[in-house]
Image (cartoon, rainbow, N blue to C red):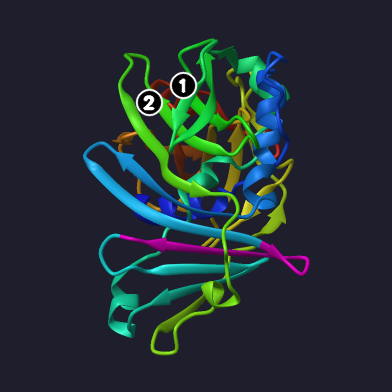
Amino acid sequence: MKLSVLLRVYLLMLGILLSPFGHSAEIKPDAVQLLREMSQSFSQLDYDGVFIHSEDTRINSMRVKHELRDGKEYESLVDLDGNKIQVIRVDNTVICVYPNEAIADKHIVSSTPFKRFIGLDSERLKLGYNFVIRPEMGRIAGREAFNIRLIPKDQYRYSHEIWLDKQNSFLLKHDVIDQSGTLLDRIQFTSVNFTPDLKEGDFIPKKESYLKKMVEPKPRRIKSHWKFDWLPDGFSLVWPEARALNHGTSMLLLSDGMATISIFVEPVKKEKATSYLSMNATVAGEKTIKVGKQLYLVTMVGEVPEVTIEKLMSVFMPKAEL
């Protein structure tokens, strides 16, 4: 299984849970409570905003509209650069909207970068990070914001700096920073309106556009034959079982409440050299493991430092019954 394919699977497996609670200026905010509120805000609030996603020298701008209407959740995500490809979601139904079929064949629509927050667990985060709230308020997109820093307790995860709207805990900005202080990844709203005048037409594709329905994979659960002899504090398996993918490949998922690491195991016939690939905040590694006469290719992909992937590779092993 090629790294590019695995990365797409990895991104698809990620998702967001983001809530509207106000805060009194006289009460000292609590970082854990703010993060809990943030974990609901993207799905609970109505909003219309523009944000940028920057990685290294690449910058992409998107417009997102969201509304709760008649008990259903409507969302529109438009790539403002290039061909203005749109993704429309109504509850769990997702449709990709392209200007024409030719463009659809050449472009792969990636999910919103906010999906890195899948499984955000504020209690588990305490095991791997120290929380610091700056005493002074920040200002993002013209709105006052709490500034929370998640400082790692070890070398196995990145630092995160988060700005949450003072009024409703909406995520206005998120930076991923490495151990040297280098910015690896940034998501930042440049404008956002929480009382938008949204219409039904905002979530209906234009007639002349080309549509493709996105179906997220639902891999079946299977018994896991692999284990880790060690894990960094706060990291644990998201699923008790593995997930079956294509061609005999199985998948495991690790998380520390913020960072996620996907592990893919597939039987192969030829041994491959151990290799690592860094893509800004994301690191991927491959290693061949021999169990009896069978070779297995282990691939790990996650938004963690390379040392984390290297260490996890060295402690990943088959269970006795394999």
Residue 79, position in %: x, y?
36, 61
**Image quadrant in which the C terminus is located:** top right
Residue at 55% across / 73% down in the picture? 203
Q: Residue at x 65, y 20 (%)?
A: 31
Q: Is residue 189 above or below residue 31?
A: below
- From the top left corner, tell me how far across and down residue 68 is, in percent: 70, 61
Res 157 visible: yes
Name the residue beneath numbered marker 1.
311
Q: CA distance from mark 1 to mark 2?
A: 9 Å
- Residue placed most toward the observer, 258 or 174: 174
Residue hosting label 2 = 306
Q: Secondary structure at mark 1?
A: helix
Q: Which residues are magenta?
A: 68-80
Q: Is residue 253 rendered magenta in the image?
A: no
- At x 32% / y 26%, what residue is drawn? 183
Most common SS among magenta residues: strand
The spot of residue 229 in percent (x, y) is 61, 22
Between 41 and 5, which is closer to the camera in this rendering?
A: 41
